[in-house]
Amino acid sequence: MRKAFLTFILFVVITMNAVGKIDKIEPSFWYIGMKNPKLQLMVYGKNIASSDVTVRYPGVHLSSVIKLESPNYLLIYLTLDKEVEAGKVELTFTQGKKKDIQFYELKQRTKKGNERIGFDASDVLYMLMPDRFANGNPENDNNKTLSPSIADRKDPNARHGGDLAGIEKHLDYFNELGVTALWFTPVLENNMNGGSYHGYATTNYYKVDPRLGSNDEYKTLIEKAHDKGLKIVMDMIFNHCGDQHPWLKDMPSRDWFNHPDYEKNFVQTSFKLTPHVDPYASSQDFSVMNDGWFVRSMPDLNQRNPHVIRYLIQNSFWWIEYAGIDGIRMDTYPYADFNAMAEWMKELN
Ligand SMILES: [Ca+2]
Ligand SMILES: [Ca+2]
């Protein structure tokens, strides 16, 4: 009884001293030796914005801490010295007397940027939709934690159970065809009501959809494809995310999205791209095309917000470093901000 009471007291003390729970930090880890020494960390957690942050690690400096309009996000900008070593950076979050220490991992890169070849006009690119190509693992077809939770091949709008395991089983087939590169429609989580089997409504930029496989399976598949002389092109979308992404329910700031008052005043893109090339186009026509939402379930990200484009650019680098992708196919490119996309290309080059 006494022991149980002491355990209870200890638990209360520990709980009282912890900062409101940190749900996650994106990217979940990073790499040393990157050309850009700056690193943005997006911290998610209830009332996390009221924390003070300190950083302790040789060669890692705190540049700024940005509080957004929502109290549930915090952006931490770090600067990494050239000589910084791989290891775990100590991040301390303090709210009054409460403290939470997180260890943020910096990893070694496996390849330098100029060792990556990319793909070009000499490649034969085969496009496939992972959900519809081959079902290599029936066990991941249904997932109660995700919507839609059940695969149904009779419903054209449902998921059909195809996955990364199915692609892996058919790598020889691509060799026989003479294909040299594979472009999958997006593999990231689409926890969306309705037909998201195509993958173009991202709800987590750092996680492969579990109905297709895990992050590890994606990485392994790419390694196996490389062994067979096949490159992998990752499909990315900077223009929009899915409306079930936590950012829409709890907007980091109103300017995170274009037309944030979508519930009262929904603006859809005109899908007319001529304002890009017409020197006499009206700014109104350009704005409707560029800032209108692709569809109601795909909120339009505001890449003019420097924090948004930084998040997205880092996401590209993370997948290159983590999974070893050979190229990127960018979806809805002309619908995203022109200057921000140019920044992405220049940095990636
Ligand atoms: Ca499956
Ligand atoms: Ca847009």
Image (cartoon, grey):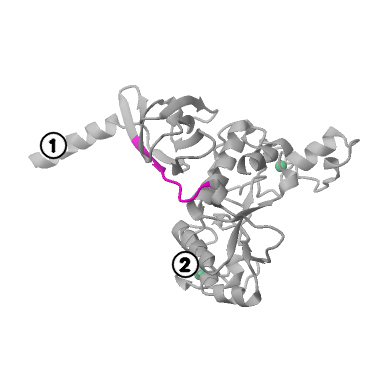
Please indicate, yes or no, whether residue 245 appears anywhere in the rendered image.
Answer: no
The quadrant of the picture occupied by the C terminus is: top right
Which residue is painted at 56% across and 67% down in the image? 229
- From the viewer's perspective, tell me whether residue 34 is left or right of residue 283: left
Q: Position of residue 14 (x, y in %)?
A: 24, 34
Instruction: Farthest residue to the front: give it.
Output: 115
Q: Is the C-beta of the residue carrying label 1 under 8 Å from the nearest atom of ligand 1?
A: no
Dot 2, how many residues are within 10 Å of its Cα: few (below 14), some (14-19), or many (20+)? Answer: some
Residue type, numbered disc 2: Asn
Query: Looking at the image, which residue is at 66% across and 40% down?
Result: 346
Q: CA distance from mark 1 to mark 2?
A: 44 Å
Q: Check whether the beta carbons of the residues at disc 1 and disc 2 lie within 8 A of each other.
A: no
Question: Nearest the camera: 216 or 223?
Answer: 223
User: At x 50% / y 73%, what residue is drawn?
Assistant: 136
Whole-percent x, y for residue 111 in the image = 49, 50
The answer to which of 82 and 218 lies nearer the viewer is 82
Q: Is 283 positioned to the left or the right of 80 in the image?
A: right
One can see residue 202 in this view: yes
- What secondary structure is found at the residue carrying circle 1? helix
Count of labels shown?
2
Q: Which sits earlier in the primary sequence, circle 1 or circle 2? A: 1
Residue segment shown in magenta = 102-112
Give x and y (percent) for residue 50. Answer: 43, 25
Residue extending farthest to the right is 280
* Label 2 sits on residue: 140
Label 1 amino acid?
Leu
Work out whether 304 lies above or below 128. Answer: above
* Residue at image mark 1: 6
Residue at mark 2: C-beta within 8 A of ligand 1: yes
Would you say 342 lies left or right of 152 here?
Answer: right
Does 294 appear above or below 251? below
Asked if residue 198 is among those painted magenta in the image, a careful observer would answer no
